[in-house]
Amino acid sequence: MGEFSPKTIVQELDKYIVGQREAKRAVAIALSNRERRRKLPPEIRSEVIPKNILMIGPTGVGKTEIARRLAAMINAPFIKVEATKFTEVGYVGRDVESIVHDLVEMCARKVYHEQLKQVESNAERLATDRIVSYLYQQMTQRGRKAVEKGQQAPGSNARLAKSPPILSGGPVSTVTRERLAKLVASRKLEDHFVEIEVSDMEPGGMLFDTRLDMDLEGDGVWFDDSARGFRGRGGQRKKKVRVKEARRILLREEANKLLDLDEVLDRAVSDTEEYGLVFIDEIDKLCGPKMDIGRDVSGEGVQRDLLPLLEGTTVMTRYGPVNTEHILFVAAGTFSQNKPSDLIPELQGRFPLRVELSPLTQEDFERILTEPKNSLTSQYAALLSTEGVSLKFTRDGIQEIARLAVLMNERMENIGARRLFTIIERLVEDLSFTASERKGERVVIDADYVTQQVGSLVKDENLSRYIL
């Protein structure tokens, strides 16, 4: 992320998220400080820790989107978790350390596929060569057997005629490797069966190394003495598949041979430690009522289990130890029924930066509908254009949609910008259903159209609770 300054990060976030400048500035500075730390001398670098952020604000105002867009922008390992999915250690449920397991798992897959692209062309060439070798060997053997049978019994020419039509230019034994290579490369033998050799320890059908595909609770016998990973200990077995399937299986094998998988996993651990970003949603739900007897396994216990991760600890994963000291944690909650001070003091101290996100106004809704690169109006216009329907939203139509969204959020549960999804989906429902019959038609979504399609539902408050 060297080319991103705090200002450019905010500008990039502005392309997708309306308003909430304070929150954008906070995350931009936190990310930039982490990059600045990497440029410090080692003796100072170890003393600088990330400043975790607590976002406070109603649902649907952009808390999750800010974190998600930020991670995508800098290509950082990122996961989102709900705090309510975890329980205190020793009870049935997810342990908070699984956050780190999931983060490094995701990072390992990302690094693997990035490096896979670098060797893909070479792996494909090697896989094609193996397919040609298998075909040539098998066709030559079949040709010899056919000749031997032909010397002993009449009618052998009829049996030779049953060879694949594309290879019927002569006896199978005379097919050259060059001709086979051209046929395989031009995809003219895709449905022809070929017998290949595959590793016993690599299940067919997955373009992925087994170490990067093993379940977290998999059989421990696969691991070597160092618990660093596991190695396939089986031999080779023969498998008869179509050429197109053989290409996929052999491409996986050849790619894994070209990759240094230890280097992939080392980089995955390193990237997780240096660039990892964890978004913990619904953290306010951990502020349960005080209990006079026993412990609140769904609230305070989870808060205390989170402390080591936030402060910095080493978690053993199947890819090796991962230190969480420099992973950035961003937590969020509405805090509508409680306040941040209801969190245990130790956890509050682990989130030194706090930003409050503002509720969305009608003007914000209007901007959300039109300004972002991925605005809802442009998305629906693009969807219907695939059916030949031209969709245009007028200014007064946008204003009416925004007004109805604000009204519905006031009447019932305030779900923020997510209300726009429900209203627009209802608005274009009939168009989407009949689009194939309206090819070439131009539809204008103005205020009258919005009122006609959605207005009656809004007036019926009981009905709108179920539909909008």
Image (spheres, rainbow, N blue to C red):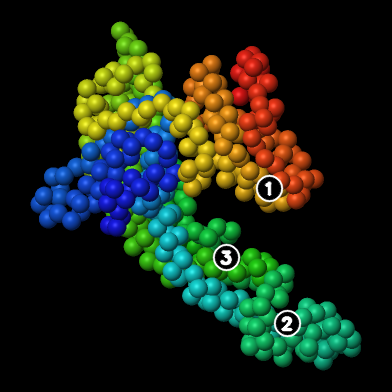
Q: Helix, strand or loop at disc 1?
A: strand
In the shown orientation, is residue 119 left or right of residue 280? right
Q: Quadrant of residue 164?
A: bottom right
Q: Can you identify the residue that label 2 sits on?
A: 142
C-alpha separation, residue under disc 1 versus residue under disc 2? 60 Å
Q: Helix, strand or loop at disc 2?
A: helix
Give neighbour class at mark 3: few <14, some 14-19, many 20+ (Cα, 10 Å): many
For the question of whether residue 422 can be seen, the reply is: no
Residue closest to the eye, 279 or 252: 279
Where residue 118 appears, x then y in whole percent? 43, 69
Q: Can you identify the residue that label 3 sits on?
A: 249
Residue closest to the eye, 447 or 88: 447
Q: Amino acid at mark 1?
A: Ser
Between circles 3 and 1, the one closer to the viewer is 1
Q: Please, which residue is most extreme toward the left here?
A: 43
Upstream in the sequence, badge 1 or badge 2? 2
Q: Please, which residue is most extreme toward the right here?
A: 155
Where residue 294 appears, x then y in whole percent? 32, 13
C-alpha separation, residue under disc 2 versus residue under disc 3? 24 Å
In the shown orientation, is residue 427 left or right of residue 364? right
In the shown orientation, is residue 112 left or right of residue 148? left
Between circles 2 and 3, the one closer to the viewer is 3
Q: Vertically, is 310 above or below 415?
A: below
Q: Can you identify the residue that label 1 sits on?
A: 390
Upstream in the sequence, badge 3 or badge 1? 3
Residue closest to the eye, 451 or 2: 451
Residue at 89% from the left image edge and 88% from the top image edge: 154
Q: Helix, strand or loop at disc 3?
A: helix
Q: Amino acid at mark 2?
A: Arg
Residue at 29% from the left image edge and 48% from the top image edge: 7
